[in-house]
Image (tube, helix red, strand yellow):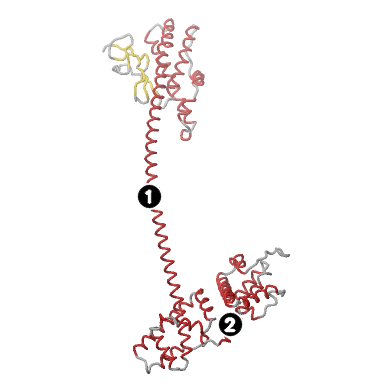
Amino acid sequence: MDAHGQKKLLSIADVFKAFGKKVDGNHYQKAHKQYRTLSDHARYLAKSDKQTHDALKSYYEENEQIYPACLSDDQKQICLPLYDFLCSAGTVFDLTNVWPTYVFLVEVYNRQRTILRKNDSHLNKSGDYISNILQCMKTGMEEEILKTANTEYLNLLGDERQMKRNPDLAREKELWVLNGDVAAQKFLDNIEYMDRALYRTIKEAVLRNVEGSQIAWCQYGSLLHSSELLKRDEQQMARRSEKGITDLQEQCEELERQNAIKSREIEELSKRLCEVDKLKVTENSSNADVNDSDEVNDIGKKFSDVYNNEWAKLFDSLKSEIEDETARIEKLCGCLLMAFKFCKEESEKQMNNLQVATTNVLSFRSTQNEENVVPMFRESYTSFTTTNEAILRDFESYLIRCVETCWYMCIQDPPLNINIPEKGDTVDEKLFNLYKSEGDIVDVCVWPALLLGDNIGIVCKGQVLTKIN
């Protein structure tokens, strides 16, 4: 950083990198083109006269003048786009080390132009000398040769115009011209051009000492050089294009090869994944079937135990209160039915409150405690009253077991259901056993049948009291 806090740049190339994006694109292109031209001239001088190049470079780098204030108008105007670009960059960056390089490049360029003017090269002559020679040689040359020569000349002019539209080729041409007539003559010594009609025509004019033939000869060499520059550039572009196509083809082939490998890998992985999924489905299905079957069987056993134990004990205890056997059966079966309905409604209500769409149903079903349901059932349903404490204890025990078992039934997936036939129905022997009776008509349901889901399967058979039809 300088005293003003500006970043110090060391070369013109650094200025283009740091400041190039902050100016108009057209301005940038013009300035950069001039910089490349000046650099080419400096390299040419270093190659042709290194001593002079180094002396000039040292002089301007060690000069203690204050730039750009001390620059002459010629030093500013000769490369105005580059000068303006550096002035703009100088408002942002410290170009103390850059301006001497600019002056050095400008002075080298001026020196080259001065030498070229002093050499009085035929290449600097303006005018269409070749056309004049073609006119003069109409006498003494075959008409067909002159016609071909004129066509060659027009083609060379076209190549010259096209070459100048390429900035890189134009700069290379400008440096070539610095070598003067020697460069043109050296180019014309190429045996490749000696059989051409235009070559033979101008060469004949030189031998006849036709006025302007020497200038035309050098200009012809310059046109051949321009045509060769263009031809070389087209060949390089063709090679680059061909290489680009080859590279793209190789990339495509490589991508196709990789794609084929990936496809095979995906296919193999898909097969393996399908096999794993099948194994998982089989394993999960087996585990689910085993687990569900064990749990359902366990609930079926609980359901049967309630009938064999609590139901039977309470049935006998109630005999002193309710003498009619059918009435006692209906009383106990009705109690079970109320417990089942209550548990079913309560489980569905709690499931809805938990918003099943975002809750693991199986987790809910396995974590609800049946002990919480018994008090709720007591609050909703009043048990019958009696002064016999033994009957009350038996009834309480029966009630608790009914609620507990029904709660387990209702929270299964799928839930377990009970089947209670209507009086007068024909007995379904698949679902019910006969209770102390004979016949095929249901008189009263003693104990319901326990079913899996909506009659998916029978967990345990019930008991019915029948009468003969």
Q: Which mark is residue 445?
A: none
**Upstream in sequence: badge 1 or badge 2:** 2
Q: Which residue lies furthest to the right in this view?
A: 3
Q: In which quarter of the image is residue 443?
A: top left
Q: What element carries label 1?
A: helix
Along the line of sight, which residue is nearer the eye, 264 or 42? 42
Q: Which of marks 1 and 2 is in front?
A: 2
| 238 on left or right of 48 | left
Q: Residue at x 38, y 33 (%)?
A: 279
| 98 on left or right of 400 | right
Tell me the amino acid under the disc marked 1: Ala
Q: How far apart are marks 1 and 2 (CA)?
A: 63 Å
Q: Residue 113 carries which label?
A: 2
Please determine whether, in this image, residue 76 is positioned above or below residue 393.
below
Q: What element carries label 2?
A: helix
Q: Residue at x 50, y 22 (%)?
A: 369
Q: Quadrant of the C terminus?
A: top left
Q: Where is residue 213 in the image (x, y as percent from the top left)?
A: 46, 90
Q: In which quarter of the image is residue 435?
A: top left
Which residue is denoted by mark 1 in the rendering? 260
Along the line of sight, which residue is nearer the eye, 368 or 67? 67
Q: Where is residue 184 in the image (x, y as percent from the top left)?
A: 48, 83
Please determine whether, in this image, residue 290 is positioned above or below residue 261.
above
